[in-house]
């Protein structure tokens, strides 16, 4: 046989391929996450929205400060500085969708499942990297948004210190909520397999229940509203617990349960369906 | 070693793979041949546990693919050259694959060099040609130094140099004792690469035989002979149970006798031969004859013309 290159590269002694483990799959998923441009873009947009929208909204409120005592009493400086979280959740959720629906779109899901034939480690690996990456980037972002916002609001003495009851929890809770939305996007992407379908599903889960509840008689909608995904999830981001909403951590736990159900359905479908 | 027993895949009313039983042995290149839509890719996906069979079973190196703890050491597969994220580099695509089972980084560099992508591995794979995508897919298949290699239509999109490289690569892998299972819809390509053929059409097994036997059986050789007295020669040859037909230029097309026999018959009768040639029917033609009833997609034949 004549060939310019050796047919198979010779390898030094030692095993080449070892067992597939969850830790190895997490490393692999981290490599995948960081090696596509859409990751950096989504996260940059998310961080930019958290800090930028928070600062803009704080500036807006400073120029038009609450006038009467009732408005001053109900003014929530933490919520003002964290206003960007409600927009950043879309960027983070879409990143979660792309992480798995993108693999179906490009066909790389077959490469992934051929390497990890038990499949579920791939889903859990993606969940770990999207959850941790979102949290690690969004926690400094929500903290920065809070500090920037408060320094702007201090011009009118509207600011609040981080040490006040519930404030630190709201800042941390906002980042946790964003991490959970990333997982929700991931679960929807794995469940629906198409980017467009999963993005539509994400918008549906985040916005549709509140709209539909509004169509019900007030007695009913008031009763179910606290248990809807987003109202439950954002309870943890409120400094003053809303009497109409669930308690902060109960609400977040319920949102986590919704996300877990979506991920469980995705896992069930991943195991059963042809790739 | 790949062993399929009664492997069946049904999509709704359509049987994509119909009761396939075959064994792919190590040490030789086994070609998996069939027209487009015959069920080759579906079969390969079932081998890799990506699609679940409707019936039957298939094992790789003795057990179902899903049960291997280190699947990349058992099987390296190329299913689709476009299966790479366009925004990711070839290097990180392979690295992510390697990390699932602890393959070291230097091995990624080795396979990148081995398939000739050394210069472009760090660039975005979205700019790759189909041929470069095939090379990347082959690099991925070799990554785990697997005992079994499965390649779906690997020569698609490759240039002549690439096709020659693939042939020697596949034969080299087989010579090292690996199981090499490679699909194609091109008979001529498989005739040059594979020592064993598994031929399917419409999901059903048509042939499972050595390539040489398949060619000999499917395309019986003929003899072309031109002489000073074609009529006399034709009747002589017919008396020896040969089938003889005339060609336009006065030559005879003879089947059932070898060139040696035709030459001796003519010599004994004192007929001068002007030309005596052994002819092999075209492989593609033989393959088409074999799979004619099993072709799913075919343009309507335009009347009159030769096949």
Image (spheres, coloured by chain):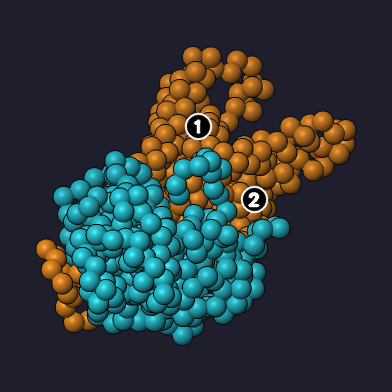
Chain colours: A orange, B cyan
Res. B158 in view: yes
Towards the viewer: B187 or A101: B187
Judging from the image, what secondary structure is the residue with disc 1 in?
loop
Q: Is residue B89 above or below residue B268?
A: above
The spot of residue A210 in percent (x, y) is: 72, 35
Give coordinates of residue B113: x percent, y percent. Answer: 17, 60
Residue at x-position 45% and y-position 49%? B307
On screen, residue B184 above or below A97: below
Neighbor class of circle 2 (other Cα within 10 Å; few <14, some 14-19, many 20+) is many
Q: Position of residue A176 (x, y in %)?
A: 52, 49
Residue at 34% in and 65% down: B232
Residue A165 at least partly seen: no
Tags 2 and 1 both on a single chain: yes
Separation (CA) of disc 2 from disc 1: 19 Å
The quarter of the picture where residue A222 lies is top right
B296 or A43, which lies in front? B296
Residue B176 or residue A57, whichever sits in front: B176
Kindly check if marks 2 and 1 are in contact, taking CB atoms under 8 A apart as contact. no
- Chain under numbered label 2: A
Q: Nearer the viewer, residue B171 or B138?
A: B171
Question: Is B230 rendered above or below residue B241?
Answer: above
In this view, the residue farthest toward the bottom is: B62
Q: Residue placed at 35% from the left, 81% from the top?
A: B26
- Residue B25 is left or right of residue A7, and the answer is right
Which mark, residue A150?
A: none
Residue on which disc 1 sits? A84
* Residue at the spot of label 2: A255
Q: Position of residue B156 (x, y in %)?
A: 35, 52
Quarter holding the N terminus of chain B?
Answer: bottom left
Residue lying at 41% horizontally and 75% vertically, measured from the top left: B239
Please tell me which of labels 2 and 1 falls first in the chain: 1
Q: Residue B14's quadrant in the figure?
A: bottom right
């Amino acid at each position: 046989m004549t060939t310019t290159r050796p047919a198979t590269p010779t390898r030094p002694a030692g095993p080449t391929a070892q067992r597939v483990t969850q830790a190895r799959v997490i490393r692999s998923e981290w490599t995948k996450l960081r090696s596509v441009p859409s990751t950096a873009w989504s996260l940059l947009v998310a961080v930019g929205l958290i800090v930028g929208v928070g600062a803009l909204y704080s500036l807006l409120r400073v120029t038009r400060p609450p006038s009467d005592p009732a408005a001053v009493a109900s003014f929530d400086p933490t919520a003002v500085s964290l206003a960007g979280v409600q927009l950043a959740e879309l960027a983070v959720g879409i990143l979660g969708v792309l992480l798995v629906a993108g693999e179906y779109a490009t066909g790389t899901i077959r490469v992934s499942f051929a390497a990890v034939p038990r499949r579920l480690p791939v889903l859990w690996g993606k969940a770990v990297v999207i959850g941790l990456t979102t949290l690690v980037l969004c926690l400094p972002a929500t903290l920065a948004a809070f500090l920037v916002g408060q320094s702007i609001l201090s011009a009118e003495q509207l600011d609040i210190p981080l040490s006040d009851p519930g404030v630190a929890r709201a800042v941390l809770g906002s980042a946790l909520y964003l991490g959970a939305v990333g997982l929700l996007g991931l679960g929807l992407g794995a469940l629906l397999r198409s980017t467009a379908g999963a993005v539509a599903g994400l918008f549906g889960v985040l916005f549709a229940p509140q709209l539909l509840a509004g169509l019900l008689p007030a007695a009913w909608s008031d009763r179910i509203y606290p248990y809807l995904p987003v109202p439950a999830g954002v309870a943890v981001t409120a400094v003053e617990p809303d009497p109409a909403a669930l308690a902060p951590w109960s609400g977040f736990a319920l949102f986590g349960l919704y996300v877990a159900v979506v991920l469980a359905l995705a896992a069930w479908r991943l195991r059963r369906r042809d790739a | 070693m790949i062993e399929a027993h009664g492997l069946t895949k049904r999509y709704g009313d359509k049987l994509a793979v119909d009761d396939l039983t075959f064994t792919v042995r190590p040490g030789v290149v086994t070609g998996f041949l069939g027209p487009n839509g015959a069920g080759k890719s579906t079969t390969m996906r079932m081998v890799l546990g990506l699609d679940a069979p409707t019936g039957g079973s298939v094992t790789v190196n003795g057990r179902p693919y899903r049960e291997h703890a280190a699947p990349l050491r058992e099987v390296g597969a190329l299913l689709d050259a476009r299966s790479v994220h366009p925004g990711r580099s070839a290097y990180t695509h392979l690295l992510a694959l390697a990390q699932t089972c602890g393959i070291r980084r230097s091995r990624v560099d080795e396979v990148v060099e081995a398939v000739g992508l050394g210069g472009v591995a760090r660039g975005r794979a979205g700019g790759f040609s189909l041929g470069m995508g095939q090379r990347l897919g082959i690099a991925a298949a070799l990554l785990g130094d697997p005992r079994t290699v499965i390649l779906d239509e690997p020569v698609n999109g490759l240039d002549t140099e690439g096709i020659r490289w693939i042939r020697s690569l596949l034969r080299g892998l087989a010579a090292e004792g690996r199981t090499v299972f490679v699909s194609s819809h091109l008979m001529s390509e498989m005739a040059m690469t594979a020592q064993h053929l598994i031929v399917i059409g419409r999901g059903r097994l048509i042939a499972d035989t050595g390539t040489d036997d398949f060619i000999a059986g499917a395309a019986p050789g003929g003899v072309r002979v031109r002489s000073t007295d074609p009529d006399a020669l034709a009747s002589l040859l017919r008396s020896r149970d040969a089938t003889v037909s005339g060609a336009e230029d006065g030559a005879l097309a003879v089947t059932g006798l070898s060139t040696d026999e035709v030459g001796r018959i003519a010599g004994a009768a004192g007929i001068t031969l002007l030309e005596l040639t052994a002819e092999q029917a075209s492989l593609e033609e033989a393959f088409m004859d074999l799979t004619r009833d099993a072709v799913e997609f075919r343009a309507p034949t335009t009347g009159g013309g030769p096949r």
